Image (cartoon, rainbow, N blue to C red):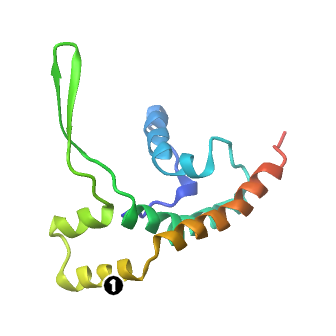
C-alpha cells in the first residue's frame, strides 16, 4: 500500500540527480490523475492528499491490477522480459504471508465495504474542483 502523500514528492537532500527517480514515481500515480501542469497553489495539497487517501488510493490498491517484472534477460540485441500474473496490491499483500489473521480479516472487511464504481465517481467528483482551482490560479512572477 502507498503511505506516501501525492502532493509532496521531492528529491532527497544531497542527491541532486534524483529527479529521474522522482519523475518515475510521479508518472506512476499523480501524472495520470492530475496531468502535466505545475500545481503551485499550496491550498491544493490537502485536497489532493485527501483524494489520494480516500478514493484514488483504494481504487488502485484494491481494484486495479498490475504486472510485476519477474525476470529480465538479454538475447542478442533484444531484452526479454517475464512478468507474473496481474494482481492488485491487496492480492499481493494477502499472498505475501506478512499479515496476521486479524490484519487479514480487517483488510478483507475493508475490501468488501468498497465499491469500485463509487470510488471512480468520487475521484471524478473531487478532481473537478482541484483542477478548476489549478487552472485559474495565476502563476507568480
The residue wearing badge 1 is 109
Is residue 74 something one can see in this rendering? Answer: yes
Q: How many marks?
A: 1
Q: Callout 1: 10 Å neighbours few (<14), some, many (20+)?
A: few
Query: On the rendered structure, is 34 left or right of 20?
Result: right
Mark 1, secondary structure of its residue: helix
* 94 or 20, nearer to the observer: 94
Q: Residue at x 22, y 13 (%)?
A: 77
Query: On the rendered structure, is 25 left or right of 86?
Result: right
The x and y percentages for residue 126 are 66, 67
Q: Residue furthest top?
A: 77
* 21 or 104, nearer to the observer: 104
Q: Residue at x 50, y 45 (%)?
A: 26
- Location of the N terminus by quadrant is bottom left
Is residue 13 something one can see in this rendering? Answer: no
- Location of the C terminus by quadrant is top right
Q: Residue at x 60, y 70 (%)?
A: 122
Q: Residue at x 57, y 52 (%)?
A: 33
The x and y percentages for residue 100 are 18, 80
Q: Is residue 139 above or below residue 114?
A: above
The x and y percentages for residue 4 are 45, 60
Using the rendered view, name the quadrant where residue 73 is placed.
top left
Q: Is residue 110 above or below residue 8?
A: below
Amino acid at each position: 500500500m502507498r503511505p506516501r502523500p501525492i502532493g509532496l514528492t521531492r528529491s532527497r537532500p544531497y542527491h541532486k540527480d534524483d529527479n529521474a527517480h522522482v519523475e518515475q514515481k510521479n508518472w506512476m500515480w499523480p501524472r495520470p490523475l492530475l496531468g502535466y501542469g505545475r500545481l503551485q497553489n499550496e491550498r491544493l495539497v490537502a485536497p489532493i492528499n485527501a483524494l489520494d487517501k480516500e478514493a484514488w488510493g483504494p481504487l488502485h490498491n484494491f481494484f486495479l491490477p498490475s504486472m510485476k517484472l519477474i525476470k529480465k534477460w538479454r538475447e542478442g540485441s533484444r531484452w526479454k522480459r517475464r512478468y507474473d500474473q496481474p494482481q492488485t496490491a491487496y492480492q499481493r499483500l494477502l499472498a505475501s504471508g506478512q499479515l496476521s489473521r486479524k490484519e487479514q480479516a480487517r483488510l478483507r472487511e475493508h475490501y468488501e465495504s468498497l465499491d469500485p464504481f463509487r470510488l471512480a465517481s468520487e475521484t471524478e467528483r473531487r478532481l473537478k474542483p482541484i483542477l478548476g482551482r489549478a487552472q485559474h490560479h495565476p502563476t507568480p512572477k
